[in-house]
Amino acid sequence: MPAFLVTMADRAELEQAVAQQGEKVRKLKQEKASSEAIAEEVAKLLELKAQLGTDDGKHKFVLKTPKGTRDYNPKQMAIREKVFNTIISCFKRHGAETIDTPVFELKETLTGKYGEDSKLIYDLKDQGGELLSLRYDLTVPFARYLAMNKITNIKRYHIAKVYRRDNPAMTRGRYREFYQCDFDIAGQYDPMIPDAECLKIVHEILSGLELGDFCIKVNDRRILDGMFAVCGVPDSKFRTICSSVDKLDKTPWEEVKNEMVGEKGLAPEAADLIGEYVQNNGGLDLIERLLKDSKLSQSKQALEGLNDMKIMFEYLQLFGVTDKISFDLSLARGLDYYTGVIYEAVLIQNQAEPKQQNDHNEDSVSVGSVAGGGRYDGLVGMFDPKGRKVPCVGVSIGIERIFSIMEQKAEASEAKIRTTETQVLVAAAQKKLLEERMKLIAELWNAGIKAEMLYKKNPKLLNQLQYCEETGIPLVAIIGEQELKDGVVKLRVVSTREEVDVARANLVEEIQRRTSQF
Amino acid sequence: MPAFLVTMADRAELEQAVAQQGEKVRKLKQEKASSEAIAEEVAKLLELKAQLGTDDGKHKFVLKTPKGTRDYNPKQMAIREKVFNTIISCFKRHGAETIDTPVFELKETLTGKYGEDSKLIYDLKDQGGELLSLRYDLTVPFARYLAMNKITNIKRYHIAKVYRRDNPAMTRGRYREFYQCDFDIAGQYDPMIPDAECLKIVHEILSGLELGDFCIKVNDRRILDGMFAVCGVPDSKFRTICSSVDKLDKTPWEEVKNEMVGEKGLAPEAADLIGEYVQNNGGLDLIERLLKDSKLSQSKQALEGLNDMKIMFEYLQLFGVTDKISFDLSLARGLDYYTGVIYEAVLIQNQAEPKQQNDHNEDSVSVGSVAGGGRYDGLVGMFDPKGRKVPCVGVSIGIERIFSIMEQKAEASEAKIRTTETQVLVAAAQKKLLEERMKLIAELWNAGIKAEMLYKKNPKLLNQLQYCEETGIPLVAIIGEQELKDGVVKLRVVSTREEVDVARANLVEEIQRRTSQF
């Protein structure tokens, strides 16, 4: 039963109780009962009245969304729809299918996939039955899906919300509930062809969204590991040193070196050697140079990575996207499951937040990153009972970040966003025309025209026109006694105020003609 | 659902059964029950364990989605997209905006809104911070959103997943995670205009989806309550008698009467009076008759409801939808928050599941209902600190049910559904043309053509053509040494095998021309 009914019921009961108790007291007084007895009942009465006084029948709710989450209002939804359309049409242009998975998974499906970050997983309360957790990303559910359905080849995108009990920085587009937008190619294919297509897709999407200039940094997990090996990093320290290198985009080398040597006990010489390598970035030229590098070329892993990187750059040239792509030895993405090429796209100069350009804290830089991904050939095997591997490469578009840039741009610009697509308002010039408006609007709806009318019996024409101004409806179909006699509708263009009588039979066609550009 | 998944589900259930049986035995022992009783239960336990033991040897990672949930594969997603497009374009045609809300709300936001059903709410584990629950429907979050943002007027749709710890009947489209698809009009307007538009929308959507013949039953909460009053139902019994009436679509009157009289202690005469009323259904004629009904017309409430029903039917005639709409006194929707008109759309004869036509259990009938809604003028006020009311009327489309009908139809029909929109495959006639394929496909992508190529250096032409057959790609752009020399591409129509040389400069235009109908 809804709460307001409950309180009303409680309240009614309470009022009744007060009345009865009052009656009782009156009786006792009539019966000249002992003052103690009367006092006792009066006390009860006052108590009841007090209760009634406090409960004013209204509810004091905390009116908010949970920490780190937000509602999308119609304006934000309009922006969201625009962004999704750009991205999805790119995925479809590349022949991707799409899938969806439940918002929660068996807890055990997620355990052991996120290392350190597992503490950020939302668990569901144990209410009997299975133990569940909200998905933390779309990659692990994708791997579970492939293994469960024994799928060895698929090119799919998946756009859905994921959940992390992280410290939100919502102004910068970091939430606890946020969209991920993943495109992945699973299957055993000839080297670097799918990898190159993923980068082509990032290039197309970031260009299409017109977010300003961007750069896609690429590296390879094997080159990183090889580099660590030849620099004298003990295997046991690969991962932790890798995460230090990962900070180089936001932290100066000296600090990173101190962390490596001071905190993580790496030999200073090793750190210095790493320091020389990670300063490098470029294209094919750099790859060639490193292939000849006396030290690095001693690492079989590094050579594999460099040779594949070379192949990929040749493909990227054929795709015509090398202008935005930089082979950067300092790129080391955190996630453990990457096994080959890794990449990350950053906005080079973010007009949307100039204030942050020289601001070097975690957030302000991390928000610069709008896409990232890489190759993960081992993950699916973790789910397969027989450990069968399904090589995968994919990219995740940082769509929340893109939303907030778009929202800021929208606020900045004058042009106001429409939240509906209504083509025409059906209006009346005089009173008593509700029935005629209804007949006309039904005709328009049935013909596929997007039409609205005010939900009033006798709206003023001025109010109807104002509604169009406010909501951006371009046309008004006005009917009055005269128009009905003449079998026409007065079609008014809101922007120019031009009015023209259109034969009812031609109205649909005329509206379509005039709104085709909208 | 693949058999493999079922066995996983069975196994999970089996494990649960073993646990429960073990608990039972432990209890009996604690309670010092008779040794026979204990022996009996132990026997059951051992049997269960034996069943489990069969494939228990190496306990593996259970590869499944949580109970009552499912993945959507690409085919299902294609159907889902088609259904959504039909529904969303109808909502937009009626000038609706859209919003989104978080998947979870503060627990207290949901408390006291669902009465009995509260036990079906998914709570999140208390991991510190706020207590959260997964949304149970989209209506309460909508009311919270309106109150929180002090919105008094909006026409919005919201399509999103909601969560109920219910007993799933997945083959019939009943899940624990499922989509709701709501359209609501909030605001103080002239009577029955928005209410009638909601029914027009249901009519448009169900017609557009071509689910077969349907009927929209309408009634009014006030007419029901008035009817109960004049039939001599005590106020205290309104709700429970209402829920009995609610069963009339699936239970014969005699049973319902027994429940009213036997279980719920209603006077038999009262039940009989109700029985006469609830048999009635029709249109304006019935409304007129009931307005003159000597008994019913004594109820102020009933008269209000009947007069509004009359106005609405006049509007529905203007909208031209009365053919599918029936005023039905036996319609009594469960939800407490309805305050005025209520409605429910049912598929009259569901070809998709003929086997169920004479099958009269809860599921088989409830699946017939594909949309429902009504007016709820009190809900938003519950959230407003000052109790300000925002009248609302809305409809919820039973989209999961519609998905499963569509999926069954798709399986039945020969026509196979495409899961991609790829227009052309870029293929090579000979070896060593990977680079040329990459150059060409990049040209096509950049021109907005949906194109794919096989991720192989030297694919056989036959395999490339087979790939088109399998995935339904209509065109193949074939390049070979000769074509490169001549500056042309051989464009092949997969269905007819017709081939034509197209000048490279005209290729994009030619592909667009030939695929415009796809």
Image (cartoon, coloured by chain):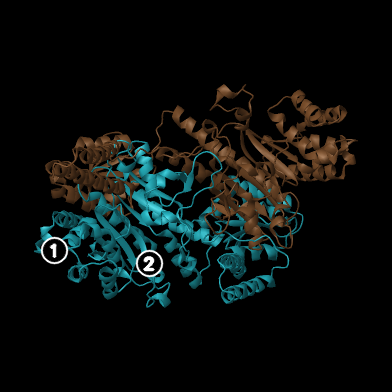
Chain colours: A brown, B cyan
Q: Nearer the viewer, residue B330 or A488?
A: B330
Q: Earlier in the sequence, mark 2 or mark 1?
A: 1
Residue B84 appears anywhere in the view:
no
Q: Is residue B155 above or below residue B326?
A: above
Residue occupying the point 21% across, 57% down: B235
Judged from the image, the secondary structure of the residue bearing numbered disc 1 is helix
Residue at image mark 2: B366
Callout 1 crowding tier (Cα within 10 Å): few <14, some 14–19, many ≥20: some
Comparing B426 with A170, the one in front is A170
Please rate how many residues cluster around mark 2, counting C-alpha atoms within 10 Å: few if below 14, some from 14 to 19, many from 20: some
Are labels 2 and 1 on one chain? yes
| Kind of residue sitting beneath label 2 | Ser
Q: Nearer the viewer, residue A60 or A299?
A: A60
Residue picked out by circle 1: B290
* Residue A145 x %, y %: 62, 58
Tell me the number on the disc at residue A27: none
